[in-house]
Image (cartoon, rainbow, N blue to C red):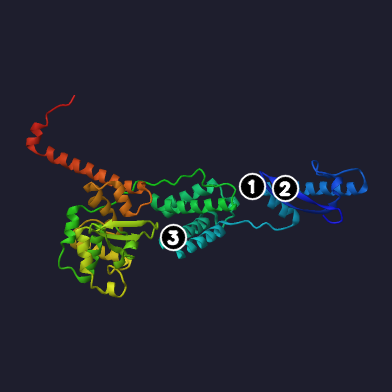
Amino acid sequence: MIDGLAPIYVRLTIEGRRTQFSLGKKIEPDKWIQKAGMAKGSGQEAKIINNYINTVRGELQKNYNVLISQNEYVTPEMVRNAYMGVKEEKKTLMELIDYHLLRVQERVDAGRMSKNTKKHFVTTKLKIQSFLRNKYNLSDEALCNLKYQFVIDFEYYFETFEGVKKNTYMKYMSCLKQIIRHAVRLGWLKTNPFQDFKCTYEPANKDILTMEEIELIYNKSNLIKRLEEVRDIFIFCCFTGFAYADLTNLSPDSISKSVDGEIWLQTYREKTGTKERVMALPIPIEIIEKYKNHNCRKIQNRLFPVNSNQKYNAYLKELADICGINKYLTTHLARHTFATTITLSNGVPIESVSSMLGHKDIRTTQIYARVVQQKVSQDMKDLRKRMMNNPTMKEESKLKIA
Protein backbone atom coordinates (compact mmCIF):
# COMPACT_ATOMS: atom_id res chain seq x y z
CA MET A 1 0.00 0.00 0.00
CA ILE A 2 1.40 3.39 -1.06
CA ASP A 3 0.04 6.78 0.08
CA GLY A 4 -2.79 4.97 1.85
CA LEU A 5 -4.11 3.54 -1.45
CA ALA A 6 -4.51 -0.19 -2.19
CA PRO A 7 -4.34 -1.68 -5.71
CA ILE A 8 -7.49 -3.31 -7.10
CA TYR A 9 -7.03 -6.83 -8.49
CA VAL A 10 -9.22 -8.90 -10.79
CA ARG A 11 -9.59 -12.50 -9.68
CA LEU A 12 -10.82 -15.08 -12.21
CA THR A 13 -12.10 -18.45 -11.00
CA ILE A 14 -13.20 -21.29 -13.29
CA GLU A 15 -14.05 -24.70 -11.78
CA GLY A 16 -11.87 -24.02 -8.72
CA ARG A 17 -8.86 -22.85 -10.70
CA ARG A 18 -7.82 -19.22 -10.09
CA THR A 19 -5.66 -16.48 -11.53
CA GLN A 20 -5.50 -12.76 -10.94
CA PHE A 21 -4.09 -9.55 -12.43
CA SER A 22 -4.03 -5.86 -11.55
CA LEU A 23 -6.90 -3.67 -12.68
CA GLY A 24 -4.56 -0.70 -12.85
CA LYS A 25 -6.62 1.27 -10.34
CA LYS A 26 -6.14 2.11 -6.65
CA ILE A 27 -8.56 3.00 -3.87
CA GLU A 28 -8.62 3.78 -0.18
CA PRO A 29 -9.36 0.51 1.69
CA ASP A 30 -12.27 2.00 3.67
CA LYS A 31 -13.95 3.03 0.41
CA TRP A 32 -14.02 -0.54 -0.96
CA ILE A 33 -16.93 -3.03 -0.59
CA GLN A 34 -15.18 -6.39 -0.49
CA LYS A 35 -18.28 -8.57 -0.92
CA ALA A 36 -19.65 -6.59 -3.87
CA GLY A 37 -16.27 -5.96 -5.46
CA MET A 38 -17.19 -2.32 -6.01
CA ALA A 39 -16.22 1.15 -4.80
CA LYS A 40 -18.36 2.59 -1.99
CA GLY A 41 -20.43 5.74 -2.45
CA SER A 42 -21.85 7.78 -5.32
CA GLY A 43 -19.06 10.29 -5.76
CA GLN A 44 -17.24 10.95 -9.02
CA GLU A 45 -14.23 8.80 -8.08
CA ALA A 46 -16.46 5.83 -7.14
CA LYS A 47 -18.45 6.16 -10.37
CA ILE A 48 -15.27 6.13 -12.51
CA ILE A 49 -13.88 3.04 -10.77
CA ASN A 50 -17.21 1.15 -10.84
CA ASN A 51 -17.82 1.93 -14.50
CA TYR A 52 -14.34 0.68 -15.33
CA ILE A 53 -14.92 -2.49 -13.30
CA ASN A 54 -18.20 -3.16 -15.13
CA THR A 55 -16.51 -2.61 -18.49
CA VAL A 56 -13.72 -5.07 -17.60
CA ARG A 57 -16.28 -7.62 -16.38
CA GLY A 58 -18.13 -7.33 -19.68
CA GLU A 59 -14.94 -7.79 -21.70
CA LEU A 60 -13.89 -10.80 -19.64
CA GLN A 61 -17.31 -12.42 -20.10
CA LYS A 62 -17.18 -11.78 -23.84
CA ASN A 63 -13.72 -13.34 -24.12
CA TYR A 64 -14.84 -16.33 -22.08
CA ASN A 65 -17.84 -16.88 -24.38
CA VAL A 66 -15.59 -16.84 -27.45
CA LEU A 67 -13.07 -19.20 -25.89
CA ILE A 68 -15.65 -21.73 -24.69
CA SER A 69 -17.11 -21.90 -28.20
CA GLN A 70 -13.67 -22.75 -29.64
CA ASN A 71 -12.19 -25.03 -27.01
CA GLU A 72 -13.12 -28.16 -25.10
CA TYR A 73 -12.28 -26.38 -21.86
CA VAL A 74 -11.21 -22.88 -20.79
CA THR A 75 -8.83 -21.91 -18.00
CA PRO A 76 -8.69 -18.58 -16.11
CA GLU A 77 -5.27 -17.99 -17.68
CA MET A 78 -6.78 -18.26 -21.17
CA VAL A 79 -9.44 -15.64 -20.34
CA ARG A 80 -6.85 -13.33 -18.80
CA ASN A 81 -4.53 -13.67 -21.79
CA ALA A 82 -7.36 -13.04 -24.25
CA TYR A 83 -8.39 -9.87 -22.37
CA MET A 84 -4.82 -8.61 -22.17
CA GLY A 85 -4.10 -9.39 -25.83
CA VAL A 86 -1.61 -12.12 -25.07
CA LYS A 87 -1.68 -14.78 -27.78
CA GLU A 88 -2.55 -18.17 -26.33
CA GLU A 89 -0.15 -20.86 -27.50
CA LYS A 90 -1.95 -24.18 -27.80
CA LYS A 91 0.02 -27.29 -26.97
CA THR A 92 0.11 -29.81 -29.80
CA LEU A 93 0.31 -33.58 -29.95
CA MET A 94 3.77 -33.58 -31.58
CA GLU A 95 5.01 -31.07 -29.01
CA LEU A 96 3.80 -33.39 -26.26
CA ILE A 97 5.41 -36.47 -27.83
CA ASP A 98 8.74 -34.69 -28.31
CA TYR A 99 8.61 -33.53 -24.70
CA HIS A 100 7.92 -37.11 -23.58
CA LEU A 101 10.73 -38.50 -25.78
CA LEU A 102 13.14 -36.03 -24.20
CA ARG A 103 12.25 -37.39 -20.76
CA VAL A 104 12.53 -40.97 -22.05
CA GLN A 105 16.04 -40.27 -23.37
CA GLU A 106 17.03 -38.85 -20.00
CA ARG A 107 15.86 -42.08 -18.34
CA VAL A 108 17.79 -44.16 -20.88
CA ASP A 109 20.95 -42.13 -20.22
CA ALA A 110 20.45 -42.61 -16.48
CA GLY A 111 20.07 -46.37 -16.94
CA ARG A 112 16.45 -46.33 -15.72
CA MET A 113 14.89 -47.32 -19.05
CA SER A 114 15.98 -49.62 -21.86
CA LYS A 115 16.77 -48.49 -25.38
CA ASN A 116 14.15 -50.91 -26.67
CA THR A 117 11.45 -49.11 -24.66
CA LYS A 118 12.55 -45.84 -26.24
CA LYS A 119 12.24 -47.46 -29.69
CA HIS A 120 8.58 -48.24 -28.95
CA PHE A 121 7.86 -44.56 -28.28
CA VAL A 122 9.82 -43.41 -31.35
CA THR A 123 7.90 -45.87 -33.54
CA THR A 124 4.63 -44.70 -31.97
CA LYS A 125 5.45 -41.14 -33.01
CA LEU A 126 6.02 -42.27 -36.61
CA LYS A 127 2.72 -44.19 -36.60
CA ILE A 128 0.84 -41.13 -35.29
CA GLN A 129 2.39 -38.89 -37.94
CA SER A 130 1.33 -41.37 -40.64
CA PHE A 131 -2.18 -41.55 -39.16
CA LEU A 132 -2.56 -37.75 -39.08
CA ARG A 133 -1.47 -37.48 -42.72
CA ASN A 134 -3.72 -40.26 -44.01
CA LYS A 135 -6.80 -39.59 -41.88
CA TYR A 136 -6.86 -35.81 -41.45
CA ASN A 137 -4.24 -34.55 -43.93
CA LEU A 138 -2.45 -32.90 -40.98
CA SER A 139 1.11 -32.86 -39.74
CA ASP A 140 0.05 -32.10 -36.16
CA GLU A 141 -3.03 -31.59 -33.98
CA ALA A 142 -3.86 -29.36 -31.02
CA LEU A 143 -4.17 -31.34 -27.80
CA CYS A 144 -7.47 -29.64 -26.96
CA ASN A 145 -8.98 -31.19 -30.10
CA LEU A 146 -8.22 -34.75 -29.03
CA LYS A 147 -11.38 -36.60 -28.11
CA TYR A 148 -12.41 -40.24 -27.83
CA GLN A 149 -13.16 -40.26 -31.57
CA PHE A 150 -9.45 -39.65 -32.22
CA VAL A 151 -8.56 -42.73 -30.17
CA ILE A 152 -10.95 -45.11 -31.94
CA ASP A 153 -9.97 -43.67 -35.33
CA PHE A 154 -6.33 -44.39 -34.49
CA GLU A 155 -7.21 -47.98 -33.57
CA TYR A 156 -9.27 -48.42 -36.75
CA TYR A 157 -6.34 -47.06 -38.79
CA PHE A 158 -4.17 -49.93 -37.54
CA GLU A 159 -6.86 -52.51 -38.27
CA THR A 160 -7.42 -51.33 -41.85
CA PHE A 161 -4.55 -49.25 -43.25
CA GLU A 162 -1.59 -50.78 -41.40
CA GLY A 163 -2.98 -54.31 -41.35
CA VAL A 164 -0.92 -55.38 -38.33
CA LYS A 165 -1.91 -57.86 -35.65
CA LYS A 166 -3.85 -56.65 -32.64
CA ASN A 167 -1.11 -57.30 -30.08
CA THR A 168 1.32 -55.29 -32.22
CA TYR A 169 -0.78 -52.17 -32.59
CA MET A 170 -1.98 -52.33 -29.00
CA LYS A 171 1.62 -51.64 -27.96
CA TYR A 172 1.45 -48.35 -29.88
CA MET A 173 -1.98 -47.57 -28.45
CA SER A 174 -0.57 -48.21 -24.98
CA CYS A 175 2.40 -45.90 -25.64
CA LEU A 176 0.10 -43.08 -26.78
CA LYS A 177 -2.16 -43.69 -23.79
CA GLN A 178 0.83 -43.30 -21.49
CA ILE A 179 1.89 -40.08 -23.24
CA ILE A 180 -1.63 -38.60 -23.05
CA ARG A 181 -1.84 -39.48 -19.36
CA HIS A 182 1.37 -37.51 -18.91
CA ALA A 183 -0.25 -34.50 -20.62
CA VAL A 184 -3.17 -34.60 -18.17
CA ARG A 185 -0.76 -34.61 -15.24
CA LEU A 186 1.08 -31.64 -16.72
CA GLY A 187 -2.17 -29.72 -17.08
CA TRP A 188 -1.86 -29.62 -20.86
CA LEU A 189 -5.12 -31.55 -21.16
CA LYS A 190 -8.13 -31.28 -18.92
CA THR A 191 -9.75 -34.59 -19.83
CA ASN A 192 -8.15 -37.83 -21.00
CA PRO A 193 -9.53 -39.06 -24.37
CA PHE A 194 -8.24 -42.53 -23.44
CA GLN A 195 -10.34 -42.58 -20.26
CA ASP A 196 -12.88 -45.09 -21.64
CA PHE A 197 -10.43 -47.01 -23.83
CA LYS A 198 -8.89 -50.23 -22.59
CA CYS A 199 -5.86 -51.78 -24.27
CA THR A 200 -6.74 -55.44 -24.75
CA TYR A 201 -4.43 -58.17 -25.96
CA GLU A 202 -5.14 -61.54 -27.53
CA PRO A 203 -3.61 -64.56 -25.76
CA ALA A 204 -0.16 -65.06 -27.25
CA ASN A 205 0.57 -68.41 -28.86
CA LYS A 206 4.14 -68.73 -27.64
CA ASP A 207 6.10 -71.41 -29.47
CA ILE A 208 8.37 -73.61 -27.36
CA LEU A 209 10.75 -76.49 -27.87
CA THR A 210 10.15 -79.95 -26.51
CA MET A 211 12.86 -81.77 -24.58
CA GLU A 212 13.42 -84.00 -27.61
CA GLU A 213 14.01 -80.96 -29.82
CA ILE A 214 16.39 -79.43 -27.28
CA GLU A 215 18.39 -82.68 -27.19
CA LEU A 216 18.44 -82.79 -31.00
CA ILE A 217 19.98 -79.30 -31.20
CA TYR A 218 22.34 -79.93 -28.28
CA ASN A 219 23.72 -83.16 -29.75
CA LYS A 220 24.07 -81.88 -33.34
CA SER A 221 27.67 -82.37 -34.44
CA ASN A 222 29.83 -81.26 -37.39
CA LEU A 223 28.57 -77.68 -37.31
CA ILE A 224 30.65 -74.85 -38.70
CA LYS A 225 32.13 -72.54 -36.05
CA ARG A 226 29.56 -69.70 -36.24
CA LEU A 227 26.61 -72.12 -36.04
CA GLU A 228 28.25 -74.07 -33.22
CA GLU A 229 28.63 -70.86 -31.21
CA VAL A 230 25.03 -69.84 -31.86
CA ARG A 231 23.86 -73.36 -30.94
CA ASP A 232 25.75 -73.24 -27.64
CA ILE A 233 24.40 -69.80 -26.72
CA PHE A 234 20.85 -70.79 -27.69
CA ILE A 235 21.01 -73.96 -25.55
CA PHE A 236 22.47 -71.90 -22.70
CA CYS A 237 19.43 -69.59 -22.87
CA CYS A 238 17.05 -72.57 -22.99
CA PHE A 239 18.43 -73.62 -19.60
CA THR A 240 18.72 -70.15 -18.03
CA GLY A 241 15.92 -68.04 -19.57
CA PHE A 242 18.06 -65.01 -20.36
CA ALA A 243 16.72 -62.67 -23.06
CA TYR A 244 19.06 -61.51 -25.83
CA ALA A 245 19.51 -57.98 -24.37
CA ASP A 246 20.49 -59.45 -20.99
CA LEU A 247 22.66 -62.15 -22.54
CA THR A 248 24.91 -59.47 -24.05
CA ASN A 249 25.43 -58.00 -20.57
CA LEU A 250 26.65 -61.24 -19.00
CA SER A 251 30.29 -61.18 -17.94
CA PRO A 252 32.48 -63.37 -15.69
CA ASP A 253 31.37 -61.06 -12.86
CA SER A 254 27.80 -62.34 -13.39
CA ILE A 255 28.86 -65.72 -11.98
CA SER A 256 28.85 -66.32 -8.23
CA LYS A 257 28.98 -69.30 -5.90
CA SER A 258 26.60 -69.65 -2.96
CA VAL A 259 27.52 -71.01 0.48
CA ASP A 260 26.22 -74.45 -0.52
CA GLY A 261 28.58 -74.54 -3.50
CA GLU A 262 25.97 -73.93 -6.21
CA ILE A 263 26.85 -71.67 -9.15
CA TRP A 264 24.47 -68.77 -9.82
CA LEU A 265 24.12 -66.37 -12.74
CA GLN A 266 22.86 -62.88 -12.04
CA THR A 267 22.16 -59.71 -14.02
CA TYR A 268 19.60 -56.92 -14.20
CA ARG A 269 17.04 -56.99 -16.97
CA GLU A 270 17.60 -54.19 -19.46
CA LYS A 271 13.85 -54.07 -20.15
CA THR A 272 12.66 -53.55 -16.57
CA GLY A 273 15.75 -53.11 -14.42
CA THR A 274 14.66 -56.01 -12.17
CA LYS A 275 17.12 -58.59 -10.88
CA GLU A 276 17.34 -61.88 -12.79
CA ARG A 277 19.08 -64.64 -10.82
CA VAL A 278 19.24 -68.25 -12.00
CA MET A 279 21.03 -71.27 -10.58
CA ALA A 280 23.23 -72.80 -13.29
CA LEU A 281 22.32 -76.36 -14.27
CA PRO A 282 25.03 -78.77 -15.57
CA ILE A 283 24.60 -77.89 -19.27
CA PRO A 284 24.98 -74.09 -18.82
CA ILE A 285 28.05 -74.72 -16.61
CA GLU A 286 29.51 -76.93 -19.35
CA ILE A 287 28.96 -74.20 -21.97
CA ILE A 288 30.44 -71.49 -19.72
CA GLU A 289 33.53 -73.64 -19.24
CA LYS A 290 33.82 -74.24 -23.00
CA TYR A 291 34.28 -70.50 -23.69
CA LYS A 292 36.52 -69.60 -20.74
CA ASN A 293 39.53 -69.01 -23.04
CA HIS A 294 37.61 -67.37 -25.90
CA ASN A 295 38.60 -63.87 -27.03
CA CYS A 296 35.16 -62.60 -25.97
CA ARG A 297 36.32 -63.04 -22.35
CA LYS A 298 39.80 -61.65 -22.83
CA ILE A 299 38.95 -58.64 -25.01
CA GLN A 300 35.28 -57.78 -24.37
CA ASN A 301 34.86 -59.24 -20.87
CA ARG A 302 31.75 -61.04 -22.11
CA LEU A 303 30.69 -64.53 -21.14
CA PHE A 304 29.95 -65.53 -24.76
CA PRO A 305 30.67 -64.34 -28.33
CA VAL A 306 27.23 -62.85 -29.02
CA ASN A 307 26.35 -61.68 -32.53
CA SER A 308 23.92 -58.89 -33.35
CA ASN A 309 20.30 -59.87 -32.77
CA GLN A 310 19.65 -59.88 -36.53
CA LYS A 311 22.57 -62.21 -37.29
CA TYR A 312 21.79 -64.39 -34.29
CA ASN A 313 18.21 -65.01 -35.49
CA ALA A 314 19.39 -65.58 -39.08
CA TYR A 315 21.88 -68.21 -37.89
CA LEU A 316 19.21 -69.83 -35.73
CA LYS A 317 17.08 -70.27 -38.85
CA GLU A 318 19.98 -72.11 -40.48
CA LEU A 319 20.39 -74.23 -37.38
CA ALA A 320 16.69 -75.17 -37.37
CA ASP A 321 16.91 -76.27 -41.01
CA ILE A 322 20.01 -78.37 -40.37
CA CYS A 323 18.39 -80.03 -37.32
CA GLY A 324 15.10 -80.60 -39.16
CA ILE A 325 13.08 -78.59 -36.66
CA ASN A 326 10.01 -76.99 -38.23
CA LYS A 327 9.81 -74.10 -35.77
CA TYR A 328 10.87 -70.48 -36.05
CA LEU A 329 13.83 -70.35 -33.69
CA THR A 330 14.47 -66.91 -32.20
CA THR A 331 16.41 -65.53 -29.27
CA HIS A 332 13.18 -65.23 -27.28
CA LEU A 333 11.95 -68.77 -28.03
CA ALA A 334 14.77 -70.01 -25.77
CA ARG A 335 13.35 -67.88 -22.93
CA HIS A 336 9.87 -69.33 -23.52
CA THR A 337 11.34 -72.84 -23.52
CA PHE A 338 13.09 -72.27 -20.18
CA ALA A 339 9.83 -71.04 -18.62
CA THR A 340 7.79 -73.99 -19.88
CA THR A 341 9.71 -77.12 -20.88
CA ILE A 342 12.60 -76.72 -18.43
CA THR A 343 10.92 -75.30 -15.31
CA LEU A 344 7.11 -75.23 -15.09
CA SER A 345 6.68 -78.62 -16.81
CA ASN A 346 9.07 -80.12 -14.26
CA GLY A 347 7.22 -78.84 -11.22
CA VAL A 348 9.17 -75.66 -10.46
CA PRO A 349 6.72 -73.30 -8.67
CA ILE A 350 5.53 -70.39 -10.77
CA GLU A 351 6.73 -67.94 -8.10
CA SER A 352 10.29 -69.23 -8.50
CA VAL A 353 10.06 -69.09 -12.29
CA SER A 354 8.77 -65.51 -12.10
CA SER A 355 11.72 -64.53 -9.92
CA MET A 356 14.27 -66.20 -12.20
CA LEU A 357 12.81 -64.51 -15.28
CA GLY A 358 12.94 -61.12 -13.58
CA HIS A 359 9.22 -60.48 -14.01
CA LYS A 360 7.77 -57.57 -12.03
CA ASP A 361 4.30 -59.12 -12.02
CA ILE A 362 3.54 -62.82 -11.67
CA ARG A 363 0.66 -62.36 -14.13
CA THR A 364 3.31 -62.11 -16.85
CA THR A 365 4.62 -65.54 -15.86
CA GLN A 366 1.11 -67.00 -15.83
CA ILE A 367 1.09 -66.74 -19.62
CA TYR A 368 3.65 -69.55 -19.65
CA ALA A 369 1.54 -71.57 -17.23
CA ARG A 370 -1.32 -71.44 -19.75
CA VAL A 371 1.06 -72.70 -22.43
CA VAL A 372 1.95 -75.67 -20.21
CA GLN A 373 -1.75 -76.41 -19.63
CA GLN A 374 -2.38 -76.35 -23.39
CA LYS A 375 0.53 -78.75 -23.87
CA VAL A 376 -0.87 -81.14 -21.27
CA SER A 377 -4.28 -80.95 -22.94
CA GLN A 378 -2.78 -81.72 -26.35
CA ASP A 379 -0.74 -84.61 -24.92
CA MET A 380 -3.91 -86.14 -23.45
CA LYS A 381 -5.75 -85.75 -26.76
CA ASP A 382 -2.88 -87.51 -28.53
CA LEU A 383 -3.03 -90.28 -25.91
CA ARG A 384 -6.76 -90.67 -26.48
CA LYS A 385 -6.22 -91.05 -30.23
CA ARG A 386 -3.58 -93.72 -29.68
CA MET A 387 -5.87 -95.58 -27.29
CA MET A 388 -8.81 -95.42 -29.67
CA ASN A 389 -6.65 -96.83 -32.47
CA ASN A 390 -5.64 -99.76 -30.27
CA PRO A 391 -8.03 -102.72 -30.89
CA THR A 392 -7.56 -104.02 -27.36
CA MET A 393 -8.42 -100.65 -25.86
CA LYS A 394 -11.47 -100.40 -28.11
CA GLU A 395 -12.83 -103.64 -26.67
CA GLU A 396 -12.15 -102.52 -23.11
CA SER A 397 -13.62 -99.02 -23.61
CA LYS A 398 -17.27 -100.13 -23.59
CA LEU A 399 -17.75 -99.03 -20.01
CA LYS A 400 -20.56 -96.54 -19.87
CA ILE A 401 -20.69 -93.74 -17.35
CA ALA A 402 -24.19 -92.72 -16.36
Determine crowd level at label 1: few under 14, some 14-19, many 20+ residues with C-alpha closer than 10 A: few
Quadrant position of residue 34? top right
Type of amino acid at the residue the image marks with label 2: Leu
Tell me, yes or no, if residue 37 can be seen here. Answer: yes
Type of amino acid at the residue the image marks with label 3: Met
Q: Nearer the viewer, residue 206 or 104?
A: 104
Specify which label sits upstream in the sequence, 3 or 1.
1
Q: Nearer the viewer, mark 1 or mark 2?
A: 2
Determine crowd level at label 2: few under 14, some 14-19, many 20+ residues with C-alpha closer than 10 A: some
Q: Is residue 59 left or right of residue 343?
A: right
Determine crowd level at label 3: few under 14, some 14-19, many 20+ residues with C-alpha closer than 10 A: some
> Label for residue 234?
none
How far apart are labels 1 and 2 at the CA level?
A: 15 Å
Q: SS of the residue at dot 3?
A: loop
Q: SS of the residue at dot 2?
A: strand
Which residue is label 3 attached to? Answer: 113
Q: Residue at x 11, y 29 (%)?
A: 398
Query: x%, y% of residue 248?
Result: 32, 65
Q: Nearer the viewer, mark 3 or mark 1?
A: 3
Which residue is label 1 attached to? Answer: 73
Type of amino acid at the residue the image marks with label 1: Tyr
- Quarter holding the N terminus is bottom right
How many marks on residues? 3
Tell me, yes or no, if residue 227 can be seen here. Answer: no
Look at the numbered discs 3 and 1 and tell me whether their residues touch, using CB distance below 8 Å: no
| The residue positioned farthest toward the top in the image shown | 402
Query: x%, y% of residue 232?
Result: 22, 64
Above or below for 240 versus 372? below
Which residue is label 2 attached to? Answer: 12
